Image (spheres, rainbow, N blue to C red):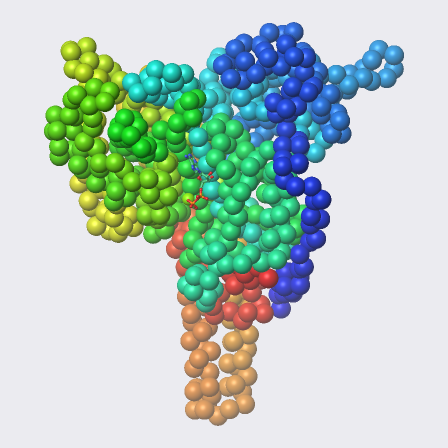
Amino acid sequence: MSTLRFRVVEKAFQAHPKEVACPAERPQEYFARRVFNREKMFKYLPTAVYARLTDAIDHGAALDREIADQVAEGMKRWATELGVTHYTHWFQPLTEGTAEKHDSFIEPDGKGGVIEEFSGKLLVQQEPDASSFPNGGIRNTFEARGYSAWDPSSPVFAVDDTLCIPTVFIAYTGESLDYKAPLLKALRAVDKAATEVCRYFDPEVKKVVAYLGWEQEYFLVDEGLYAARPDLLLTGRTLMGHEASKNQQLEDHYFASIPTRVAAFMRDLEIQALELGIPVKTRHNEVAPGQFEVAPVFEECNLAVDHNMLLMSLMRRVARAHGFRVLLHEKPFKGVNGSGKHNNWSLGTDTGVLLMAPGKTAEENLRFITFVVNTLMAVYRHNGLLKASIMSATNAHRLGANEAPPAIISSFLGEQLSRVLDHMEDSSVDKLLALGGKHGMKLDIPRIPELLIDNTDRNRTSPFAFTGNRFEFRAVGSEANCASAMTALNTAMAEQLADFKQEVDALIARGEPKISALLTVIRKYIRECKPVRFDGNGYSDEWKEEALRRGLDCETSCPVIFDQYLTPESIRMFESTGVMTRKELEARNEVKWETYTKKIQIEARVLGDLVMNHVVPVATAYQSRLVDNVYKLKSIFPAEEAEGLTKENLSLIRQIAGHTSYIKEHVDAMVEARKVANRIAGEREKAVAYHDTIAPMLDRIRYHIDKLELIVDDRMWTLPKYRELLFIR
Ligand code: ADP
Ligand code: MG
């Protein structure tokens, strides 16, 4: 009898919500308590230093050593008041997590004691061992130097006793080794290109900011049940498990009232997130049982990315304090929805205009259309790359698997906006432009109803949907660092806007009036980017055929999709915008392929172990009980009667034998296939081999394990089942 499983299930049933003390204060009082934001900078820094630091944050001005020393001193003073004793450079290597190495403030005072010190040098730069992080061959171990360098645009914060300093992580030779450095470059590029385009409409615009509002989906499972599932523990997903008879069919979980135990977790998480300055706002049950969502108010993109990374690590900690484990994997359970992280993205000016929002006047709407159409062009030109930017071994389970977005990037605009673009395409520039109006222009662009801002017209199957004042990139994985998608998207937009400006300027130089030049190029783009516009059902097979005809990227193999980073168009895009060099792109792809291989390799090993240690022994034990029963029946009943009585059991014995021998054979075959793949030298080819030969075996073996789970006596089955894992009481 499987005592462990029953013990943990019983405990999970009895688990009561942990009490979360409701703070006496209101959120506005504890919001950002643990963040060295402007308010604290002002309080803890001399006025001149404050001015220099904010100038560095807002305009990228350099900070000299003396100023850095004073900033560090102010930070330390603030932090020690919170009980902080250590500091760390907090960075985002090419793994899914963040990295930190803590040092304390103490230094010997020369008199046998210690004092606490923190200098500008330590704040600004450190030298972690770059070779210990994935780097795709850029750093060899014998020259392992990598630098982490302070990113003043994301504020320093305190977690427990540690002051965390957001940093970029770069090689001694200047290449980016992390997610943040290319993101900052992409944001700079889109700022520059978008500002120039904005000046066609308003010469006062000096800066354009990219915004990101992410929606984080996740599962919670009871900690005890989680611990009894080695596959969850080691791979983040269940490699086996028959679907529960009831899962999400009744659609009774989505937006339902939140279970008390989960609500306590959420409340605790929110309080801690708010203290760290993460403006969490929304929480609800998601579609699958055991699945939930948390979303903040959107922020400047770099900060939003940091906040998402910080929130994910906070979720892991807080979940444990409540007897849960949080699953951020994109597909922890077969047969129910997976988890994504919608990236709501837009651009806004320093003059307070959201560029993806329709306006009230013809001029405002022309600007709106300019940015929407350029976004569509960017997504069209780089649809394969954008897919690569969100692809991973884990997200591959979602994309194309008849849920969330398909593995084809297209854009949904909704009826109203589509109609506006169609109208612009069909009318001549002369008709659109009736000269002699108020500002020398009057546009025949139908006034876009303000209603559009509150657009409820939704298409859940679209990977890149317009939603009123922003685009929602829905294909991003729940576990991913948003920086990957945001770097690709903002870079594509930067390149596109620069090309747009060049074309418009060329027409203006030939004497065409500005508005007419803008309209000419926009109309050309509307025609050109048409293949990427799709408002229909993204899950249908017809769409796959249609998308192929339209020339969109329809590749579904994860390692092959990564090739998109190395096409001439992608390299040109990243290099012309100064975001990444070919060398960096190549190195990153090596990391992507290697990571893919390792993930599948680990899954294959874990499945092999589970099969040999759990599944086959249990199935065999049950089978021998059935055999026993057959013998006994035969010994007490006359032969003819015994034949009838043992028929069922004999059939079960045969079924078990069939499944177990299939499983054993295929696990052996999987080991052999791994040996073959492991001998392949190139990372790309090795990943392709893992994708083509080993990954499909995991599914085939699972099929037979899940059949056994249905047959074998429930009391003997050692691993917690879906019906136990998925329903939180
Ligand atoms: P949904 O209805 O798609 O589930 P919400 O309305 O809750 O989502 O918003 C999702 C996210 O989009 C939130 O983080 C929100 O702040 C963000 N968001 C709203 N407007 C913008 C914008 N203009 N740019 C970027 N993000 C935005
Ligand atoms: Mg959304």
Q: From the viewer's perspective, is 342 left or right of 325?
A: left
In this view, the residue farthest toward the front is: 438
Q: Quadrant of ligand 2?
A: top left
- Residue 654 lies, in percent from the top left, at 42, 71
Q: Nearer the viewer, residue 684 or 417?
A: 417
- Residue 605 lies, in percent from the top left, at 50, 46
Q: Nearer the viewer, residue 84 or 146?
A: 84
Is 10 located above or below residue 369 in the figure?
Answer: below
Q: Residue at x 16, y 29 (%)?
A: 432
Q: Residue at x 34, y 15 (%)?
A: 203
Say whether residue 490 is visible.
yes
Q: Residue at x 54, y 71 (%)?
A: 713
Q: From the viewer's perspective, is 367 left or right of 207?
A: left
Q: From the viewer's perspective, is 365 left or right of 473?
A: left
Quarter holding residue 729: bottom right
- Residue 429 lies, in percent from the top left, at 14, 26
Number of numbered discs visible in the structure rendering? 0
Q: Residue at x 13, y 34 (%)?
A: 426
Q: Nearer the viewer, residue 225 or 192?
A: 192
Q: Nearer the viewer, residue 144 or 123?
A: 123
- Residue 430 lies, in percent from the top left, at 12, 25
Quarter holding residue 683: top left
Quadrant location of the N terminus?
bottom right
Say whether residue 589 is visible.
no
